[in-house]
Image: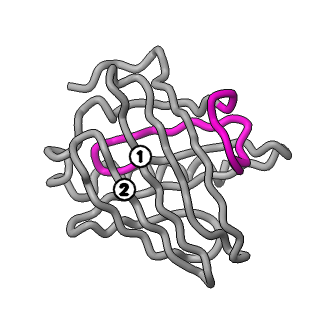
């Protein structure tokens, strides 16, 4: 129950933060997305994950391969600064809109951790591809690719 209250609070913050960003992203981003683990590669720990994307960021809930439950949120703010809301150590988060369908995020810290997260809304607006490259908390180089598919029951963005 506590996790759902936190998730709802984070979702409200993300949805109402920084309205100026809404004009910059393609409206097709908005909606619910599901991770497709069969099409994803690399070090992804989740066996199931859902993501609610708005023009201001996203909220994710996931079940790990070992059954652990996790959640996180990213708020895209003005000036290329994003706020990462997640369990664990605090990280610096910056982003750049390459165009309306392409976001590149940089995550730094703690320690040697640094990652580039390349997020693309593919043509047809029903698939998002996320490529993550960098160094983990232990200094080990890693890369992964996640494929997210838009949930079939999504209402079209207005």
Q: Which residue is mark 2?
A: 104
**Rendering coords of residue 47 (x, y %):** 73, 37
Residue 54 versus residue 110 in the image, above or below: above
Q: Residue at x 69, y 35 (%)?
A: 48
Q: Is residue 116 magenta?
A: no
Q: Which mark is residue 119?
A: 1
Q: Is residue 53 magenta?
A: yes
Residue 100 versus residue 43 in the image, above or below: above
Q: Is residue 126 left or right of residue 62?
A: left
How far apart are the two marked residues, 1 and 2, measured between alpha carbons? 6 Å
**Rendering coords of residue 133 (x, y %):** 55, 59
Q: Is residue 56 left or right of residue 2?
A: left
Q: Residue at x 66, y 66 (%)?
A: 141
**Rendering coords of residue 58 (x, y %):** 42, 47
Q: Residue at x 17, y 46 (%)?
A: 24
Q: Is residue 7 left or right of residue 20?
A: right
Q: Which mark is residue 18?
A: none
Labels 1 and 2: the sequence-earlier one? 2
User: Could you tell me if the residues under marks 1 and 2 are in contact, i.e. CB atoms within 8 Å?
Assistant: yes
Quarter of the image where one finds residue 124: top left
For the C terminus, give its image quadrant: top left
Residue 1 versus residue 38 in the image, above or below: below
Give the camera-side residue of 69 and 114: 114
**Rendering coords of residue 45 (x, y %):** 73, 48
Q: Which residues are magenta?
A: 37-57
């Amino acid at each position: 129950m506590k996790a759902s209250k936190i998730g709802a609070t984070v979702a409200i913050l993300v949805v109402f933060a920084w309205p100026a960003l809404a004009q910059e992203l393609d409206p097709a981003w908005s909606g619910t997305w599901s991770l497709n683990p069969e099409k994803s590669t690399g070090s992804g720990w989740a066996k199931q994950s859902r993501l609610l994307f708005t023009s201001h960021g996203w909220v994710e809930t996931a079940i790990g391969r070992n059954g652990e439950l996790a959640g996180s949120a990213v708020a895209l703010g003005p000036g290329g600064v994003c706020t990462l809301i997640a369990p664990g150590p605090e990280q610096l988060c910056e982003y750049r809109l390459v165009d309306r369908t392409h976001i590149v995020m940089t995550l730094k810290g703690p320690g040697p951790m640094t990652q580039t997260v390349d997020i693309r809304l593919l043509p047809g607006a029903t698939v998002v591809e996320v490529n993550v490259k960098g160094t983990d908390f232990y200094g080990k180089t890693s890369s992964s690719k996640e494929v997210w598919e838009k949930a079939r029951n999504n209402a079209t963005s207005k």
